Amino acid sequence: KQEVTQIPAALSVPEGENLVLNCSFTDSAIYNLQWFRQDPGKGLTSLLLIQSSQREQTSGRLNASLDKSSGRSTLYIAASQPGDSATYLCAVSLGFNKFYFGSGTKLNVKP
Amino acid sequence: NAGVTQTPKFRVLKTGQSMTLLCAQDMNHEYMYWYRQDPGMGLRLIHYSVGEGTTAKGEVPDGYNVSRLKKQNFLLGLESAAPSQTSVYFCAGGESYNSPLHFGNGTRLTVT
């Protein structure tokens, strides 16, 4: 079974810092990997989706990379802001009914 | 654009009661999913649908039923609620298995 791990579970940084969130997975036969943001009491919002043939995707201050061979993905957040505080989850897809989610990294950006 | 809308937002049931959670989408999603999210367990797939009139079991289907009579709506039913079904339930949809998943804001269910 696919295992998805996110380390660290929680992270606290001062505003303006660049940071990296990590996601690792055990089965490299994935279709894609998604990064989500979840605010308290809300659903998940898709931030970036990387297809298995791609190495990275960018959206604004966010950059996600994918290394299938090593089973790793990183989410880079540049110039962090208090509004970035949320839980960030990654999920890998092995098919239309096989999405495996990590437990998330809870990010706190201090003003 | 409403996206994926879940109703109700909160519900309290007594053991043995039944209820239906509604998920409505206006994004032309073929694929729709029901997940539950529990502390320490992450998101687990309950049931899913790959199109109107189709449903299939996910990872934790016991105690739940689903229907997708119309493409826009995906219903999750609990026939006889149990305390173990206390959770936050999320509906999600996608155009294909290789497109972004769009989630509703969840239903917080407590079974006493």
Image: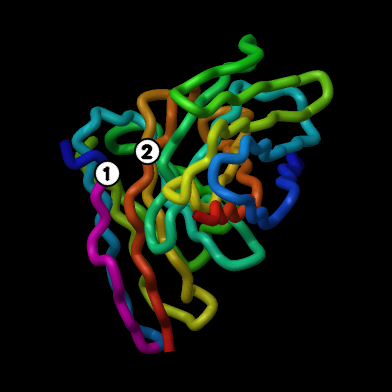
The number of numbered discs placed on residues in the rendered structure image is 2
Q: Earlier in the sequence, mark 2 or mark 1?
A: 1
Q: Please say whether residue B77 is visible from this viewpoint.
A: yes
- Note whether B49 is above or below B38 in the view shown: above
Report the disc number at residue B102.
2
Q: Residue at the spot x=64%, y=62% of the render?
A: B41
* Residue A106 figure quarter: bottom right
Residue type, mark 2 in image: His
Q: Is residue B11 magenta?
A: yes
- x and y percent of residue B12 in the render? 33, 82
Q: Which residues are magenta?
A: B4-14
B36 lies above or below B80:
above
Read off the chain for label 2: B
Residue B4's disc number: 1
Q: Is residue B55 visible?
A: no
Residue A2: say if magenta: no
Residue B104, x across and y down, in percent: 33, 49
Sort mark 2 into few (<14), some (14-19) or many (20+) by Cα contacts within 10 Å.
many
Looking at the rendered structure, whether the residues under marks 2 and 1 are on a common chain is answered as: yes
From the top left corner, tell me how far across and down residue A42 is, in percent: 38, 57
